[in-house]
Amino acid sequence: MNRKDFIKYSSLSSMAVLAAQTGLANFNVPKTVRPLAITMWEFSWLERRWPGGSYEDWDKALDELVLRGYNAVRIDAYPHLIAVDATKEWTLLPVWDIYDWGAPATIKVQVQPSLTQFIAKCKKRNIKVGLSTWYREDVDNTRLTLDTPSKMANNWLAVLDIIKKENLLDAILYVDLCNEWPANVWTPFFKAKRDGHNWSIEASTTWMKETMEIMHKHYPAIPFTFSFDYYEEKILQKNPTPYLDFVEQHVWMASLNNGEFNNAVGINWDGFSTGDLKSLAEKAEPLYKSKPEYWNNILTSSIKQLAADTQATKKPLITTECWGVVNYKDYPMLNWEWEKDLCELGVTTAAATGQWVAIGTSNFCGPQFKGMWADVAWHKKLTGIIKNAPIAPNLKGSKILNRL
């Protein structure tokens, strides 16, 4: 076999076997780019570090993440706090006291040097880091000072400049300038009239474009986006987003069809209360099991619809919050098995499309969710599916592929 014929083989495993069989073991086999298995550690990575907290020992948590097969993590970089005073001890207020993301009570944190120390530990383990922010509220509500796109951009530039100074930029997978833009809970500084979480309103797209122009100018090699939790059919085709380097879309069965499942369960989205957990414990699993094919179809059809939308716009996809219900935890009468089944369905469906370059397995892939975290075999199964999934040819040339 000559070298020209050898190049025709696209499978790395086949190429490796052929190399050995044909004496071309030193042949420079091109790397096949595959999706990353990503998890969301949001602000928990820094805020759940009290004695006995799930992230008290970063080395232990990261080693456990690697054991489960993950090679990327999305965290809050607190840009609005870093830009004011990176090494200050900030007093943060809880988003909620019932859910297990972040601290359930007032807490003091020092963002830097914690941020670069954590990134360095990820880099040592070949874990890529996606930076995001939930614009956490401190006692002075510093986030309200972000009243222009340029201020948002400048805050993020302060973060990247610190990371660059520490020679850690190569560990950064991407930057998501705002979690679930423009949801009011995360963006109280965005004063335009809202249409729920709909990012396609003019004030929102104008803000995103102006912010992205600054970010691309200063860090052209870094992929930037705003993550979304709002989706309707063909929204990306109807509202082109050339300024976004990829789409970070959050997808949950429970929120699709205008929140049909959540509404049937009786979730009160304004409350974030124990009442939600009571409703979940009493109704969620029985409701799902009453007609699983129906709920499964809502999830799979929406994933395929989203994939078709991004394929038409040649946009890579990343999803870090997914695939079953939005809010869950270790709690009486809350069983993880049905949620894991939904998440497995979501992963396999998304992976088969070729449009995703990084895929999460759930909202709950972290050591604070003990019931989910304990099933190492389940995580390995799903991360194996993700890391062996194809990436569609139409995504060739996408900036983020250079970061995988």
Image: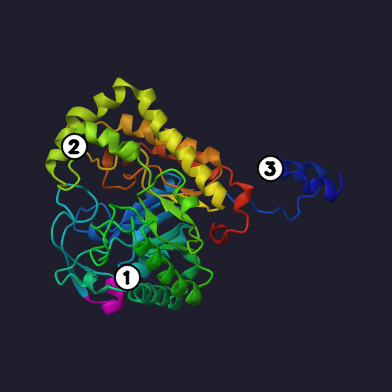
Please give the residue where the numbered disc 1 appears in the rendered image.
79
Q: Is residue 303 above or below residue 205?
A: above
Name the N-terminal-most of marks 3 and 2: 3
Q: Residues at badges 3 and 2 in contact (C-beta under 8 Å)?
A: no
Which residue occupies the extreme top position in the image?
Answer: 290
Q: Is residue 380 above or below residue 115?
A: above
Q: Residues within 10 Å of mark 1 (few under 14, many from 20)?
A: many
Residue 176 position by quadrant? bottom left
Q: Which residues are magenta?
A: 79-88
Q: Is residue 112 above or below residue 343?
A: below
Q: Residues within 10 Å of mark 2 (few under 14, many from 20)?
A: few
Q: Position of residue 98 (x, y in %)?
A: 15, 47
Q: Nearer the viewer, residue 134 or 36?
A: 134
- At label 3, the amino acid type is Ser
Q: Is residue 341 above or below residue 79?
A: above
The CA distance from mark 3 to mark 2 is 45 Å
Please give the residue where the numbered disc 2 appears in the rendered image.
331
Q: Residue at x 57, y 61 (%)?
A: 402
- At label 1, the amino acid type is Pro
- Secondary-structure class at tag 1: helix
Image quadrant containing the C terminus: bottom right
Q: Position of residue 130 (x, y in %)?
A: 42, 59
Q: Tell me if residue 85 is in the magenta stretch.
A: yes
Disc number at residue 277? none
Q: Position of residue 220 (x, y in %)?
A: 53, 72
Residue 354 position by quadrant? top right
Q: Residue at x 37, y 62 (%)?
A: 202
- Secondary-structure class at tag 3: loop
Please give the residue where the numbered disc 3 appears in the rendered image.
11
